[in-house]
Image: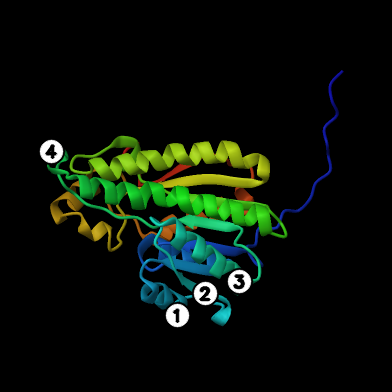
Amino acid sequence: MAASADTTTTTPSYTLTGKIALVTGGGSGIGRACCQVLAREGARLVVADINLQAAKHTLTLLPGGQQHVAVAMDVRDRRSVEDAMKAAQDQCGTPPSLLVNSAGVFTMVPFSETDDDTWQKIIDVNLTGIFLVTQAFATSLLDNGKDPKGAIVNIASIAGKTGYPHLCAYSASKGGVITLTKTCAAELASKAIRVNCVLPGVIDTPMGAMVPDELQELFKRLTPLGRLGRPEEVAEVVAFLLGERSSYMVGACVEVTGGYGM
């Protein structure tokens, strides 16, 4: 006997109003764009950055006045992460329920010339940082949140899928972000926390500007849309993944590349 379909429907809330969103690396680039788009969608922002002045500047660009806050955070350091998380909760009255892990660093150097310090710094920021922040975020939300339902989006990179010459440490770190995303997604879904990630291509940001001009032109030629991406184009996908429109997406890795690498 076939089970009868449940015809009960509810209208989901697609707004982020009332949500508190923590964005690491919120002082520039994709992180700043995410702050702007999420604030536009009604979220209250906690802008976290190792450069507190840059985070404070982001605040001046957000709609919503004085409700948003800036905190200093070094994602490589557990104490710094936990202190920033506590400061966010103290200032907002409740833990953030949305998280964007956008803090990242980038260095182009041949594999044979990559030294230990360069390798470790990139891994520490891009991969260990996401581990530390996600762990602190989930612990805070589950232990102290009035409503433990949450969502996380990690900023990976198409390089984490395809690799690229002179980007061994960066590509490895971003490949780790992809698999860390899927592992966290599998574990946290049962706790009502969804985890997904985005894989940007070359984006017109301060980090993207570190790519030499001749390589930027090569990326454009290899990209069906024929141009670099804009940070707000990544941020719009991040906002979608944080909201209820993506309520059945868990462990997804969404490419935002203009077609590069497909």
In the rendered image, which residue does mark 4 sit on? 112
Q: Is residue 238 left or right of residue 49?
A: right
Q: Residues within 10 Å of mark 4 (few under 14, many from 20)?
A: few
41 left or right of 9 in image:
left
Q: Is residue 225 visible?
A: no
In the image shown, does 220 or 63 lie closer to the viewer?
63
Q: Which residue is mark 3?
A: 90
> Is residue 227 shown above or below 173?
below
144 over 192 or under it: above or below: below
**Residue placed under numbered mark 1 in the picture:** 60
The local crowd at label 3, few if under 14, some if 14 to 19, many if 20 or more residues have their Cα within 10 Å, is few
From the image, tell me which residue sits under label 2.
69
Neighbor class of circle 1 (other Cα within 10 Å; few <14, some 14-19, many 20+) is few
Q: Of the residues tagged 1 and 2, which is closer to the observer?
A: 2
Q: Secondary structure at mark 3?
A: helix
Residue type of the residue flagged with mark 3: Asp
- N-terminal-most mark, 3 or 4: 3
- In this view of the protein, can residue 168 be seen by the observer? yes
Q: Quadrant of the C terminus?
A: top left
Kindly report which numbered mark, 3 or 1, lies closer to the viewer in this rendering.
3
Q: Amino acid at mark 2?
A: Val
**Badge 2 element:** strand
Compared across the picture, whether 145 is left or right of 224 comes to right
> At 33% across and 43% down in the image, what residue appears?
173
- Give the amino acid type for the residue marked by disc 4 in the picture: Ser
Q: Secondary structure at mark 1?
A: helix
The mark nearer the N terminus, 1 or 2, is 1
